[in-house]
C-alpha cells in the first residue's frame, strides 16, 4: 500500500515525480499548493486548521496516495502515515531551470501570461531556499526528513521514473 510524501524546493521536480507515481501506481494525488492558499489577490495562506481538514479528508477517503509540496507544516500532518518519504534537493540551479521551463499550470494560474508574470517572484523565492527559516526552507525540509524513521530517500540531482524502493 503506497502512501508517498514528496517534498523539496519549488522547481525540484515534486509534481513531475508525483505524476509519475500517479500513472505507475494509480494513486490519488494531492498537490498541497491547492490546499495551502486562499484564492485572494495577493494570495495568503489558509489557516492551518482549514488546510489540515482538507488533507485529513483526502487521506481518510483514499487508502493509497501521493502528497507533494514544499510546506513542512502541512507535510508534518501526514508524514507519519506515509510509507515512503522522498526529499528532492537537486540544488538551486536545477530548481531555477525547472521553473523557467514549466508548462502552463492551469490548476494554479488563470493563464500562461499570469504564470509568466509571476515567474520573477518565484525565481527570487527559489533562490532564498537555503537561507530562509520558515516552513518552506531547506532547514525545515531537512528536519522533516531527519525525524522520519520509515523508508526515506533524498535525491540531490534530477530524478524521474523512480519505483518505490529505488
Image: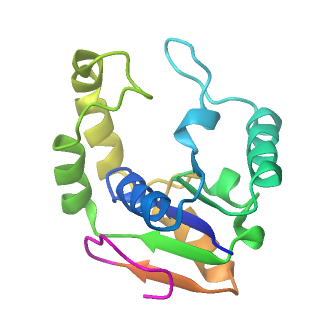
**Position of residue 72 in the picture relative to residue 108 (left or right):** right
For the point 74% across and 46% down, which residue is it?
58
Q: Position of residue 43 (x, y in %)?
A: 53, 21
Residue 13 percent location from the top left of the image:
34, 59
| Residue 146: % across, % down | 61, 81
Q: Nearer the viewer, residue 163 or 97?
A: 163
Q: Which residues are magenta?
A: 156-166
Residue 161 sits in quarter: bottom left
**Which one is nearer the viewer's eye here, 82 or 26?**
26
Q: Is residue 33 left or right of residue 109?
A: right
Q: Nearer the viewer, residue 50 or 3?
A: 3
Q: Work out whether 115 lies above or below 150.
A: above
Quarter of the image for residue 17 reads bottom left
Is residue 158 located in the magenta-colored stretch of the structure?
yes
Q: Position of residue 35 (x, y in %)?
A: 63, 35
State the residue at coordinates (49%, 15%). 42
Considering depth in this image, is 55 or 27 the residue closer to the camera? 27
Amino acid at each position: 500500500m503506497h502512501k508517498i510524501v514528496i517534498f523539496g524546493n519549488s522547481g525540484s521536480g515534486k509534481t513531475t515525480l508525483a505524476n509519475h507515481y500517479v500513472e505507475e501506481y494509480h494513486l490519488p494525488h494531492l498537490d498541497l499548493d491547492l490546499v495551502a492558499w486562499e484564492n485572494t489577490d495577493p494570495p495568503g495562506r489558509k489557516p492551518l486548521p482549514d488546510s489540515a481538514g482538507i488533507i485529513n479528508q483526502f487521506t481518510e477517503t483514499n487508502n493509497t496516495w501521493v502528497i507533494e509540496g514544499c510546506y513542512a507544516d502541512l507535510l508534518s500532518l501526514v508524514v507519519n502515515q506515509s510509507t515512503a518519504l522522498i526529499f528532492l534537493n537537486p540544488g538551486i540551479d536545477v530548481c531555477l531551470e525547472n521553473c523557467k521551463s514549466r508548462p502552463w499550470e492551469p490548476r494554479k494560474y488563470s493563464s500562461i501570461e499570469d504564470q509568466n508574470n509571476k515567474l520573477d517572484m518565484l525565481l527570487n523565492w527559489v533562490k532564498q531556499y537555503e537561507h530562509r527559516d520558515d516552513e518552506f526552507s531547506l532547514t525545515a525540509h531537512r528536519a522533516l526528513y531527519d525525524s522520519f524513521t520509515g523508508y526515506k530517500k533524498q535525491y540531490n540531482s534530477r530524478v524521474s521514473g523512480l519505483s518505490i524502493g529505488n
